[in-house]
C-alpha cells in the first residue's frame, strides 16, 4: 500500500511539474507575431511610457519571434547588418503619421545579414523592448530584434 501511495504522489508531482513547464514560455521556440501583436494604446503625439505596453507585449521580451514587414530603404543593397522593419511600405516610422509600434529596429547577429528588397520579408530573432530616442529626446522606436535571419 505504501508503494501505491508513493507512486500516486510521484505521478501527481510529475503532472504538476509538466503543467508548470507548459505554462512558462519556451524562449527557444519560434513564435510568429505581427505588427498587430505589438500594438498598444497611445495618443498621437503623446510621450511613450513603458507601462503603456500590454502584458502580452511584455511577455515577448527575450522570446524568439518571426515578424513580417518591409525593409526601410537604405543606400546599401547587400550585407545589411542593421535596418528598420516597418509595417507598411507606404509609411515610414520616422515620418509623419506613423505610430511608434509600427517599426522595429533590426540588428543582424554574427554572420547573418540581409539583402535589400521592396517585397515583404520575414525576420527571425530575439525580441526586446529597447527605447531609441532622437536628438530632441522623442522616441523614434521602442522595439528591437537581434536578428538571426531575414528572408
Image (spheres, grey):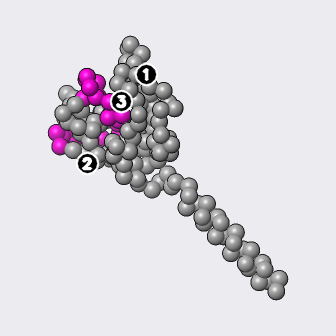
Query: From mark 3 to mark 1, how far is it between C-alphas?
Result: 10 Å
Whether residue 83 appears in magenta in the rendering, the answer is no
Total numbered labels: 3
The one of 32 and 49 positioned closer to us in this rendering: 49
User: Residue under circle 2?
Assistant: 151
Single out the residue that lies furthest toward the bottom.
1
Q: Which residue lies furthest to the right in this view?
A: 2
Q: Closer to the N terminus: mark 2 or mark 3? A: 3
Determine whether 37 is above or below 76 in the image.
Answer: below
Which residue is painted at 30% across and 41% down in the image?
A: 113
**Which residue is at a point 48% across and 27% down the rendered structure image?**
49
Dot 1 and dot 2 residues touching (CB under 8 Å) = no
Q: Say which element carries label 1.
A: loop
> Image quarter for residue 123?
top left
What are the residue bounds of the magenta stretch? Answer: 92-119
Q: Does the magenta stretch include residue 109?
A: yes
Amino acid at each position: 500500500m505504501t508503494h501505491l501511495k508513493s507512486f500516486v504522489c510521484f505521478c501527481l508531482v510529475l503532472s504538476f511539474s509538466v503543467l508548470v513547464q507548459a505554462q512558462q514560455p519556451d524562449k527557444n521556440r519560434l513564435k510568429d507575431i505581427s505588427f498587430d501583436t505589438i500594438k498598444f494604446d497611445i495618443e498621437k503625439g503623446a510621450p511613450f511610457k513603458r507601462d503603456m505596453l500590454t502584458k502580452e507585449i511584455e511577455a515577448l521580451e527575450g522570446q524568439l519571434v518571426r515578424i513580417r514587414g518591409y525593409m526601410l530603404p537604405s543606400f546599401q543593397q547587400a550585407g545589411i547588418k542593421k535596418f528598420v522593419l516597418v509595417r507598411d511600405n507606404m509609411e515610414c516610422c520616422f515620418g509623419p503619421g506613423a505610430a511608434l509600434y509600427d517599426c522595429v529596429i533590426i540588428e543582424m547577429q554574427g554572420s547573418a545579414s540581409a539583402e535589400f528588397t521592396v517585397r515583404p520579408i520575414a525576420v527571425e530573432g530575439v525580441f526586446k523592448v529597447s527605447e531609441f530616442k532622437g536628438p530632441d529626446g522623442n522616441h523614434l522606436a521602442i522595439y528591437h530584434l537581434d536578428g538571426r535571419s531575414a528572408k
